[in-house]
Image (cartoon, grey):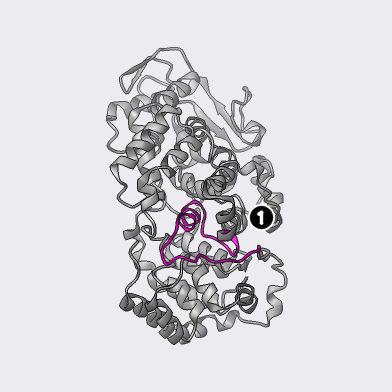
């Protein structure tokens, strides 16, 4: 693992601390007495024992916690070290068996609108639902014990990205998050792909609802067909042609979404989302002729069955296995994923017919994953959430916190294009200034709606040295110890340090 040099560490700390005066000026309007935090009431219990890592390098337990979660909280290292890394992985791969009642409490304020039928969502203020979606994503990432599940929900949300700012997506994206991403995040890729194809939000976002062919001269809308192959399955270099795009578009004609039950449609509701959305197939708007997709014939007359034939063809294509494997290796191993690891993950995906748990087990068993300690630069969302988890913070995930994510460029569910937030570090290097500002503000309780019990935190660990080892996921080196002694704010410096910004 490459550790920060003395110069790198001190530059980071000095730059951050030099900003402290400006930070205070910018946030002093937010400050009130400590009673403003009493309403949060959601501080994760400090699990015992609070034993930090004892090694000078990231060990396998710390590495697993860095990659399989949004960052360890106090006590997580000791617990996972005690139970064993493999047992922890199997625990995380069965999220339905994990008690997540604390997270349920943290998100309870949004339960009413979260679980309401889609038809009732249209009765909500159009500006209300997208912020709920964003706050739920933050709260779950911070408080959930089902950490690998939440990591994969973020991964698939980027993979099947939908911007709630487009049309009725503001009403339908919550349903998509429930019934597509969260329902299949650790399930089967083919099932998730089909659910996404018939998601009301996706039908809105990529214009599938407008994909019709009522006359021989009418051309289908190819938007979703193109992204289905370029972004969701085969990848841009996956071997498809413009002819394949148009043939897939023909196969998917006729599917649309009814915003309301009285939308003038009297046919049968055909939806994988049960009664929570009104997805329908209009046979009169479907091209029922024969098609050929990626060299495979699709017979005429299948009607709505064309969709399943397309899903079967693209989900099972070798390019899809390689594309998904590459993206997973970028997320969990390195920005430039080792070919041997990609090949191993591709084989697991193919052999298991897209079983996501099997694919992840294969990825985490590769020597390349084991060796990739400290090699990933955290994206802004990961960085912010990891800081909240590491400091055992309370947060309402509201505007005070969202403003920092906005400045860093990664507010959940706000990316405007279908490719989702960039995965590689080079896109995020320009966010360092606002990371330093965030570290100072968090360490000094200057983020409205977010609070840490700094003295309690340090006391529980038995001193600043143990806190440093916990935040760095290893014992600090000599240069880091020297910098911490000289700093005016050791917690802010740790959170702003190069070591904490990597995983």
Q: Quadrant of the N terminus?
A: bottom left
Q: Is residue 213 visible?
A: no
Position of residue 229 relative to residue 48, above or below, is above
Main SS category, magenta section: loop
Position of residue 50 relative to residue 184, above or below, is below
Magenta residues, start to end? 47-76
Horizontal side of residue 158 vs 115, given as left or right:
left
Q: Residue at x 44, y 40 (%)?
A: 206
Position of residue 53 relative to residue 324, above or below, is below
x, y percentage for residue 429? Answer: 34, 65
Q: Quadrant of residue 5?
A: bottom left
Dot 1: what SS? helix
x, y percentage for residue 282? Answer: 53, 23
x, y percentage for residue 51? Answer: 58, 66
Q: Which residue is mark 1?
A: 103
User: Foreground: 486 or 311?
Assistant: 486
Tell how many labels: 1
Horizontal side of residue 437 vs 398, given as left or right:
left
Q: Residue at x 43, y 83 (%)?
A: 17
User: Foreground: 378 or 138?
Assistant: 378
């Amino acid at each position: 693992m490459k550790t920060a040099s003395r110069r790198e560490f001190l530059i980071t700390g000095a730059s951050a601390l030099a900003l402290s005066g400006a930070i205070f000026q910018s946030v002093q309007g937010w400050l009130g007495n400590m009673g403003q935090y009493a309403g949060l009431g959601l501080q994760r219990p400090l699990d015992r024992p609070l034993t930090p890592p004892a090694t000078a390098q990231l060990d396998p337990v710390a590495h697993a916690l860095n990659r399989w979660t949004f960052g360890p909280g106090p006590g997580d290292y000791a617990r996972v070290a005690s139970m064993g890394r493999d047992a922890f992985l199997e625990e995380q791969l069965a999220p339905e068996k994990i008690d997540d009642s604390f997270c349920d409490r943290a998100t309870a304020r949004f339960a009413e609108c979260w679980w309401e039928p889609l038809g009732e969502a249209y009765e909500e203020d159009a500006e209300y639902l997208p912020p709920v979606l964003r706050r739920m994503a933050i709260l779950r990432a911070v408080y959930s014990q089902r950490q690998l599940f939440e990591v994969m929900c973020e991964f698939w949300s980027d993979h099947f990205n939908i911007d709630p700012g487009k049309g009725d997506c503001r009403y339908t994206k919550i349903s998509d998050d429930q019934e597509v991403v969260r329902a299949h995040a650790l399930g089967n890729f083919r099932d998730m792909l089909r659910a996404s194809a018939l998601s009301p939000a996706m039908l809105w976002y990529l214009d599938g609802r407008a994909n019709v062919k009522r006359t021989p001269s009418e051309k289908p809308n190819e938007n979703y067909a193109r992204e289905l192959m370029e972004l969701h399955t085969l990848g841009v270099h996956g071997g498809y042609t413009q002819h394949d795009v148009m043939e897939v578009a023909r196969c998917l004609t006729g599917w649309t979404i009814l915003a309301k039950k009285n939308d003038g449609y009297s046919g049968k509701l055909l939806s994988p989302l049960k009664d929570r959305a009104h997805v329908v197939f209009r046979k009169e708007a479907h091209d029922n002729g024969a098609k050929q997709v990626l060299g495979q014939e699709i017979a005429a007359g299948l009607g709505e069955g064309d969709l399943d034939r397309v899903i079967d063809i693209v989900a099972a294509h070798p390019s899809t296995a390689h594309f998904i494997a590459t993206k997973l290796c970028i997320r969990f191993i390195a920005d430039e994923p080792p070919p041997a690891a990609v090949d191993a993950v591709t084989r697991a995906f193919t052999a298991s017919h897209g079983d996501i748990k099997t694919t992840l087990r294969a990825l985490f068993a590769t020597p390349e994953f084991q060796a990739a300690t400290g090699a990933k630069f955290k994206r802004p969302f990961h960085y912010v959430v990891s800081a909240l988890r590491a400091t055992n913070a309370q947060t309402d995930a509201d505007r005070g916190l969202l403003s920092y994510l906005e400045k860093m460029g990664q507010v959940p569910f706000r990316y405007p294009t279908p490719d989702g937030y960039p995965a590689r570090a080079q896109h995020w290097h320009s966010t360092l200034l606002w990371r330093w500002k965030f570290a100072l503000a968090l360490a000094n309780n200057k983020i409205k709606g977010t609070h840490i019990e700094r003295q309690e935190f340090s006391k529980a660990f038995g001193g600043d040295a143990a806190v440093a080892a916990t935040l760095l996921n290893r014992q600090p080196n000599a240069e880091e110890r020297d910098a911490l002694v000289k700093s005016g704010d050791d917690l802010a410096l740790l959170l702003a340090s190069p070591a904490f910004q990597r995983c």
